Image (cartoon, rainbow, N blue to C red):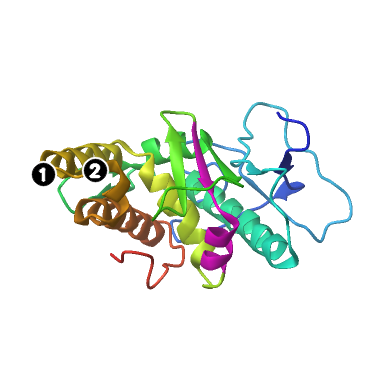
Amino acid sequence: MPDGEIIVTARIIPLTWDVGTGSTPGGSLGRGGFYADDIGESDPVTPPTDGTYQPPPDIIVDPAVIVTQAIQQALNRFAMNRLGVHVAIGNAPATTLITTNNGNFVSIDELYSNWLNLDFRLSSRTFPTGFGGQVEGKGPWQSSFSPATLTGYDADSHGSIYLALHELAHTTFASTDFLTEQYGIYRARGGLDANWASSPEFILTEKYANDIARDLAVALELPVMANPTHGY
């Protein structure tokens, strides 16, 4: 990794988290070895070495980002909430299925696989007008977002959970297919790339990802953000 780049990691201890399904770490998919950190522990606990442990996504901080106290607090909460999402996805029943508003399906297997191939980056980049960040890649993926985006969502008590689930939603086949369809409609009517983020088609793609994030949160018994950008 580049010199000076920071990766936010955490010490980990075994955690049993019942998400309302009777599951314990391992879940009905036999994924096994899900852990969450306990920042209050004074001594690090080593994860199992039998191949069952799957670490949560990294949170990478660009070296050019000035980490203020507010940003550090938001990073801490995002790190903890992303571990909660990690455990909940790992423990979800194999039958968990999200039905999208246009009749497509997102399976827990796809979400689990994508989650393990997704990293988050607090970025110093200047994003295009109308974007607070971007998901890039085709597996593995990287979700990059600005400090303002992170702290903005952190202001909501469930914002950082939503942020993680929304970015994950963008990686699904259903979401990428819908994006391709809507972008094609936009360009066919003469739309320019510079104005894409203000178009009704773009807003529909964001609402689509929001709907997947909301339905996944409900399925995993995680809190739902009431009023995300562009709504449900």
Does the residue at mark 2 contact the one at mark 1 (Cβ under 8 Å)?
no
Q: Amino acid at mark 2?
A: Leu
- Indicate yes or no whether the magenta region holds residue 221: no
Q: Nearer the viewer, residue 175 or 184?
A: 184
Q: Quadrant of the N terminus?
A: top right
The magenta region covers 141-154
Residue 19 visible (yes or no): no
**Position in image of residue 64 (x %, y %):** 70, 46
- Indicate yes or no whether the magenta region holds residue 143: yes
Q: Residue at x 57, y 52 (%)?
A: 82
**Position in image of residue 152 (x %, y %):** 53, 67
Provide the residue designation for mark 1.
Answer: 189
In the image, 95: left or right of 131? left
Q: Nearer the viewer, residue 69 or 28?
A: 69
Check the image and report above or below for 155 versus 195.
below
Q: Nearer the viewer, residue 151 or 33?
A: 151
User: How many marks do you count on the picture?
Assistant: 2
Quadrant of the rendered structure where residue 104 is? top left
Provide the residue designation for mark 2.
Answer: 192
Q: Residue at x 64, y 63 (%)?
A: 74
Q: Amino acid at mark 1?
A: Arg
